Structures are given as structure tokens and as C-alpha cells.
Image (cartoon, rainbow, N blue to C red):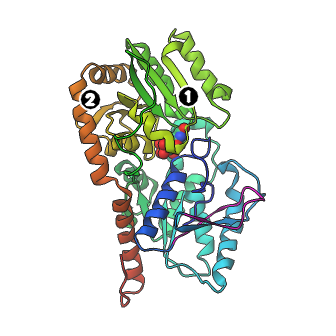
Amino acid sequence: MISEHASPLAALGGIDAGGQNLHVAELAAALVRHGHQVEVYTRRDDPRTPECVRADGYDVVHVPAGPAVALHKDELFGYMRPFGRWVSRRWSGHAGPPDLIHAHFWMSGMAAIEATARHRVPTVLTYHALGVVKRRYQRADDTSPPLRCAVETQLGNAVDRVIAQCRDEVAELAAMGVPLDGVEVVPSGVNTYRFTPDGPAAPRTPGVHRVVTVGRLVPRKGYDDLIRAVHGLGEVELVIVGGPPEGAAADPEGQRLADLARRLGISDRVRLVGPIAPADMPAWYRSADVVACAPWYEPFGLTPLEAMACGVPVVTYAVGGLQDTVLDGVTGRHVPPGDVAGLTQALRDLLTDAPLRRRYGRAALDRARTHYSWPATAAHMATVYAGLLHARNPQEKVAS
Ligand code: UDP
């Protein structure tokens, strides 16, 4: 695998560390348990990091491409060719190339194309996020390299298989000019051993309902709308989990949200708890009556699945992958994006009806375990890999 900016070893919850880091870590580990050997190539961003680190049965290889310092992912474009050439040289050594390469994010796709110029290796690409979608919502605030959208279309035509994470992404890919016969939908998974309904819950404020929302403190996560929705509700507190290591209070976006809560007169009901270690996340989900997601857009969205695996119903804007994972009227509620009154009403419906919450919560747990476990996701992915290897070498028997 190549995951140029999102190391599986990185802490989660920082500005550039989120779902992709976790996805790569979980997929790599699940593929190992499925009987595969996995190496993950990621950019070296600290001179003290060893070239190769063993993690959960797979190797993380730190590639020297650009300065060995932390850089924002939008600054990495120019380093992708050297990244790919370094990987290619490594494959020219005695170990040889892998059977297959799976690139995560478009820039990893560029590195993969460079690496496979000298080695005939089938290439799979998961975009994780699409430039056209980001530009549509972030407009002038989108700092992606200007060539991103064009390169993403080229990559979709160049690789052997594109993995879309949800149906909404398939529609976007078609509009971009990516041939759909090379697209396969494989949703992300959730760790159903770690995220369970049983176990400790974070302490609650007595007599007050709790809505939890989780993610990086960036505007597109739509916390403003949740703060406004909670303003329209009675004895309800909103807990926003996530933010940079320095904490939410030190973060400009955290301060902006705290200001909004103050202006609305609900500072006592909006808590920005800052970043929480992944191991402690289940306790925060379990402490919620409802988990809410109100993003402008969401390529996949791991947090609702994590909530569901903890048996918690989810109220969500109907965007991106959230339309597939959350079933409206079964595991939670869909609300049209931007509809704050609808969000308020959906939260009110659930918060005032404990049996409904229990019913949705049970169905959510069932759905997470049945459809989104990592062993199932890895097995699905391995089938895609096996199909590609078989197409290359029809004589050879390929294990899936
Ligand atoms: N997360 C965490 N601690 C935090 C905030 C988030 O461990 O304080 C994790 C969260 O549990 C989830 C991931 O970060 O696994 C966020 O993934 P998602 O796909 O929801 O959003 P992204 O950050 O990729 O946009």
C-alpha cells in the first residue's frame, strides 16, 4: 500500500490525521490476518523515524521524499515522483516488487504510477476524498494543488481498479469521466471488537440528554449547525470530540465554535472536549443518547459507523457515505444537508423517545457487525485483488 501523507502509525484527531490513517491501519492488519503480506509506504516526516517499523503484523516503510519534517498534504504534490522512484528502486532490490499495489489518496496514486513504470504490478486506487467535491464546497478555501481534479481523472483511467467507498462516490466518478467498469464499491470497515456497546462510558451530566459528535475541528464538519440545533432543544448538551493535540481551546476553529455557543447563550450546554485517544473513543460514543453528524460533505465517515457499533443511533445529514451506512428510520435519521430545523426535529424525536432510541441502536449494532466488520471488508478487498491477479495470470491459481 502507499499512503503518502496518512501514516497508519500517526495519532488520530489532528488536522491532517483522520479516517484515512485508521482505514489504512485496519485494512493492512485485517489483510495480514487474512493471510497476506503487507507493506505500507508513507512519507518520512521526522528524521528520527527508522526506515522500517513493524506494526500489527505489517511493515510501515518511511520513504524519503521531500524534507523530513511534517508538511500539510497539499504541499506534497512535487514530492510524489521522487516518492515513486524511491519505491521503484526498492523493488529493484532482491525482495522484488509486490504482487499488487493499493494506493490511498490521489497523490499516492501518482507515486504508484511512477513506481509501476518499471515494474508490471496491478494497481488499485482508493481516493478517500475527491477534488471536485472538495472544490464544490470549500471554493476559495480549497488549498489543493490546482492540477488535482485533472490528475484524479487521469488516475481513474490509468489504474486497474478504483475502489469507491459509497454509491455517492460512484456517481461523482462517473461525472469525472472515470470508466465505471473499473470501479468496485468496497465500503470501509469498523473495528467491531473495540467498538462495542459493553464497557465503560464517559461520565454524564445528571438529568441532561447528550448528543455527541466526533471529528477534526474543521468548518466542513458542520458543528455550527449542531450548535444551532441544540440551541433549539431543552435539556440537551452537545459534546464535540476532536481537535489538535494542543486542545480545542487553543484552536481558532474551537474558539470560533465556543464564541457561537456563547452568542447563543448555551456555553453551558456545548462542550469541546478536544482530542481523545482512539482507545477511549468507545466510552464517549457509549455516553451518548444520539450521535449526530452534520458535515457539508463526507467522503465516507467512520464516526457514525463507530457509534453504530456501540449500539448508538445516528442522526445525520444525508451526504456522501453517510447515506449508505445510516439507514433512515431503521438505524437513525437522515436530514437534508443544511436543514437546521430538520436536524433539531430529528434530534428531538429521538431524545424524547427512549424505546425508539433503543430500537434504532439495536438495528445500528446489527448493521455495523453484519455489513462493516474489518474481516468482511478485508475479504471483499482480497477478492478484488484476486480478480486482478487472475486477469493478469489466468493460468495461475490465486488465493482470495
Ligand atoms: N478520532 C479519534 N479521536 C478524536 C477524534 C477522532 O480517535 O479525538 C477518530 C474517530 O474515532 C475516527 C476518525 O478519527 O476513527 C475520524 O474519521 P472520519 O472518517 O469520521 O473523519 P475524517 O477525519 O477522516 O474526515
Above or below 80: residue 230 = above
> What residue sits right under mark 1 in the picture?
273
Amino acid type at circle 2 is Arg
Numbered mark located on residue 357 in the image: 2
- Disc 1 Cβ-to-ligand 1 distance below 8 Å: no
Residue 393: % across, % down: 41, 86
Q: Nearer the viewer, residue 303 or 218?
A: 303
Q: Residue 276 is drawn in which quadrant?
A: top right
Amino acid type at circle 1 is Val
Above or below 280: residue 210 = above
For the point 45% across and 74% down, the residue is 36
Q: Residue 79 is drawn in which quadrant?
A: bottom right
Q: Residue 232 is drawn in which quadrant?
A: top left
Callout 2 crowding tier (Cα within 10 Å): few <14, some 14–19, many ≥20: many
Horizontal side of residue 131 vs 399, given as left or right:
right
For the point 62% across and 59% down, the residue is 4
Report the residue that reaches farthest toward the front: 200
Numbered mark located on residue 81 in the image: none
Secondary structure under badge 1? strand
Q: Nearer the viewer, residue 123 or 93?
A: 93
Horizontal side of residue 15 vs 181, given as left or right:
right
Residue 275: % across, % down: 58, 36
For the point 36% across and 61% down, the residue is 375
Check the picture and name the quadrant holding the C terminus.
bottom left
How many numbered marks have been drawn onto this rendered protein structure? 2
Check the picture and name the quadrant holding the N terminus.
bottom right
Residue 305: % across, % down: 38, 44
Callout 1 crowding tier (Cα within 10 Å): few <14, some 14–19, many ≥20: some
**Residue 120 shown in magenta:** no
Residue interval drawn in magenta: 38-55
Secondary structure under badge 2? helix
Mark 1 or 2, nearer chain start: 1
